[in-house]
Image (cartoon, rainbow, N blue to C red):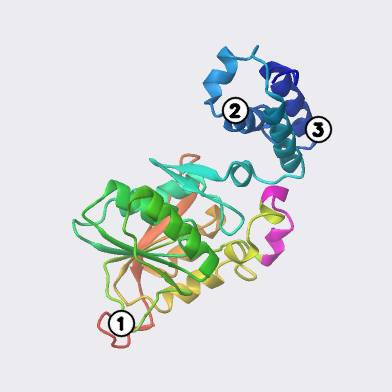
Amino acid sequence: MSGAGTVRDAIAAATDALGAAGCDTPRLDAEVLIADVLGVDRGALVTGSGADVPAASARTIGERVRRRVVREPVAYITGRKGFRHIDLAVDARVLIPRPETELLVEVALEAPRGARVHEVGTGSGAVALALMHERTDLRVSASDSSAAAVDVARSNARALGLDLPLAVARGLPDPSAWEGDLVLANLPYVSTAEMATLAPEIRDHEPHDALVAGRDGLDAIRGLLAEVPAGTAVALEHAPHQAQAVRGLLDRAETHRDLANRERVTAGTARGGRSAGGKPGRR
């Protein structure tokens, strides 16, 4: 059944609505949403722009555009997000994986063969699963303080056919017993004052507990580093303006820049509250 207008009409109407709502990339968002409903890639929208949109699809497109008008993120509406070489299911239980977080994976790819790697604050599982996908020799595990987020990560691991050990924990699952080679973390790093300045997509839709970490945004990072065994390699994502402060929390620290040339991931070794093996480490 047709009569709901053409693909071209749908794209134009959606673009106008999203532009009026203040979305940064209205045409792109419109194309992604419409292509997803029609089950085609964005390129096919161009070649098939004169085709009629079935009435049922038009209703679904309208509903999704209305969700985007209130600034719900596109990834939550479609239910998925690409990250490096994998595709992930995402919803409001987890943060949407960002392109800049791929740098954390790139840093971890330099780990020695067979290294034991644990990701804290895994969310959708993006970092840990991308690392497992690209380095099958590594022994990767992950955790998150949110049981709901761990459910999402577990579902993504199952869909990708990857056996990722997961735990619900704030920080390392068992700091007194954990022994590994590398800790990765993209923890909350937004300050409480910054929260009000974030885009509506983030401020009103993504989980606050995964975003905010105290007055300077570094509470979660400090808490993790206090329990990581001294001398353990660590790689942390942070805001560019926090790079110097994060370097000051690690030994032999080096900050890596993202594709926009912003200081985004700092790697070094933990000073920790204990040494490897459970003995107290230096403060």
Question: Pointer 1: residues within 10 angstroms few (<14), some, or many (20+)?
Answer: few
Q: How many marks?
A: 3
Up-down relation of residue 262 to residue 275 (above or below): above
Most distant residue in the bottom direction: 279
Q: Residue at x 75, y 21 (%)?
A: 4
Given residues 205 and 90, the one toward you in this image is 90
Asked if labels 1 and 2 touch by Cβ distance under 8 angstroms, the answer is: no
Quarter the C terminus occupies: bottom left
Residue 187 showing in the rendered view: no
Q: Which element type, helix, strand or loop, lies under badge 1?
A: loop
Mark 3 — residue? 20
The CA span between labels 2 and 3 is 24 Å
Write down the residue under mark 1.
Answer: 177
Residue 261 horizontal side relative to residue 142, left or right: right
User: Residue 30 sits in which quadrant?
Assistant: top right
Q: CA distance from mark 1 to mark 3?
A: 54 Å
Q: Does residue 128 appear to the left or right of 3 in the view shown?
A: left
Q: Secondary structure at mark 3?
A: helix
Sort mark 3 into few (<14), some (14-19) or many (20+) by Cα contacts within 10 Å.
Answer: few
Question: Residue 271: image x %, image y %?
Answer: 36, 76
The quadrant of the rendering that contains the N terminus is: top right
Mark 1 residue type:
Ala
C-alpha gap between disc 2 and disc 1: 51 Å
The residue indicated by pointer 2 is 38
Name the residue furthest front.
1
- Residue 276 lies, with reference to residue 27, above or below; the image says below
Q: Secondary structure at mark 2?
A: helix
Amino acid on which the number 2 mark rests in the picture? Leu
Region of the chain picked out in magenta, as a range: 192-201
**Which mark is in front, 2 or 3?**
2
Question: Chief secondary structure of the magenta span?
Answer: helix
